[in-house]
Image: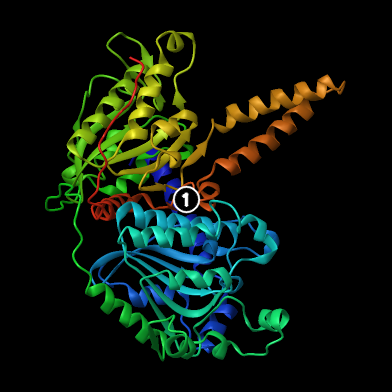
Amino acid sequence: MNLEFNKNEEALKMSVSIKNERYEKIKAGGGTKSIEKQHEKNKLTARERIAYLTDEEKPFIEIGSFAGFEMYEDQGGCPAGGTVAGLGYISGRQCVIIANDQTVKAGAWFPITGKKNLRMQEIAMENNLPVIYLVDSAGVFLPMQDEIFPDKEHFGRIFRNNARMSAMGITQIAAVMGACVAGGAYLPIMSDETLMVEGNGSIYLAGPYLVKAAVGEEVDAEILGGAATHNEISGIADYKFPNEQECLDHIKKIISKLAAPKTAGFNRTEPTLPKKDPKEMYGMFPQGNVKPYNMVEIIERIVDRSEFEQFKEHYGKTIVCGYARIDGWAVGIVANQRLVIKNKKGELQMGGVIYNDSADKAARFIMNCNQKKIPLVFLHDVTGFMVGSRSEHSGIIKDGAKMVNAVANSVVPKISIVIGNSYGAGNYAMCGKAYDPRFIYAWPTARIAVMGGEQAAKTMLQIQVAGLKAKGQEVTPEAEQELLSKLKGQYEKQTSAYYAAARLWVDEIIDPLDTRKLISEGIAAANNQPHIAEFNMGLLQV
């Protein structure tokens, strides 16, 4: 028995267990009473609707379940951003599904709700996937309207995207199963087809109370904008159904008749499981991520047959590059090596750091994958680029810029998995959120920040102590230590996977054992987009 392995395994399993516990609480939405009220109205919850709609034998990949996590405590919270969303299969066709959760503040839109919905539309547009909207929302959360209504990345962008997707030929189906109010009323009408549930579904620019206040007219919701009104009088809606199940059944029929999509043609063979046990990853990742480990061993537990063909294996060793298959899909993998290595010059290089040679190698490999139209997978555990006079004199900024340029201009799908650290410019070079990965996931052990917590806290401490001394205040060693502890705690919270997922810097926090499945489903989604831009690197410092 390996004691170190067992400790690592226990720690990572505990992290996954905590993640699962938090997720189960999120799944409850607005709570048991709110769910019961939904059922009393003969309405399913958002998750029940998705479960009924999607194919049982295929996976549903939830996106943004931790959106809004611990962000709106003064407002009573906003589990999953008040929206359940993800990639699912309907009648065998992979689709984007977005469902308002009426149990959370009547499905009202918080700032993070808008960001999450825009992210889902972005996924649909990038991957040419049909979109299903399951509408049940009271509209904008008025106490925070200034943070959700007017800006480019706010509520109105949703309808702009409706129009753009329609022009792109992307199918959009809206099922109105509850309230659809004010500006939100445009969403179903800008979709290809609108379905409504009798008795519960309603669409109007202004509800009964606002109509009374604005024009003095007294009218109930059903006459104002119910299923009969919009199917028989206004002609706004296309179908009406007596219950949600029949409505969802009709969506399945619509999707079953769509023409088969053209594909990007990414190479896929018969999937084969890894020869090395994926569960061993739990024991390989060091507790607290403070010790070296071999990233190749992690890779071999994700890829088919555990076969990984390294590119420039003996050069630039702090980044591992190579070709493999994941669930049959051909991929190029760029990963940070965490072992301390010695290069041929006899120089020691720290694991997780990007040096001149590793940046140069990674840039070349990324260009190769673009040339061959092979999707890229990035596995993050990076503390940043090497600093110091030797690196600066060797042109680390130039070599780093070359790698960043290759990532930024890459036209093949990029999928990022943040396993451990993702710090500073290393986050950019390894395709962090700012570099348009098609999907980006994080293990519970992920840390995303401008620098490590210890360095950041000490840097902030020096600045604050200098500021206090400049004002003539004495700072005792005890006070300095107390301030350092406070800064560390604050920074640790801000660098956690949960902080990142709450703000959608990552799409989801995942169990390491799901890494392979999520990469495969991500490439399957990307393969629906037949249009790949021409690869052009632009100007490089050489």
Question: Which corner quadrant holds the N terminus?
Answer: top left
The residue at the far left in this view is 270
Disc 1 secondary structure class: helix
Q: Position of residue 392 (x, y in %)?
A: 46, 11
Which quadrant is home to the C terminus?
top left
Q: Amino acid at mark 1?
A: Ser
Residue 60 visible in image = yes
Please name whichever residue, 30 or 11, is drawn nearer the observer in this view of the structure: 30
Tell me the residue at 82%/20% (across/down). Answer: 469
Residue found farthest to the right: 472
Vertical relation: 80 (above or below) 372: below
Q: Quadrant of residue 6?
A: top left
Task: Please state which of residues 113 and 485 is positioned toward the viewer in this rendering.
Answer: 113
Residue 443 x, y percent position in the rendering = 42, 47
**In the rendered image, the vertical position of residue 93 relative to residue 116, given as above or below:** below
- The reply, left or right, for residue 229 in relation to residue 274 is right
Chosen colour scheme: rainbow
Name the foreground residue: 441 vs 434: 434
Report which residue position mark 1 lands on: 15
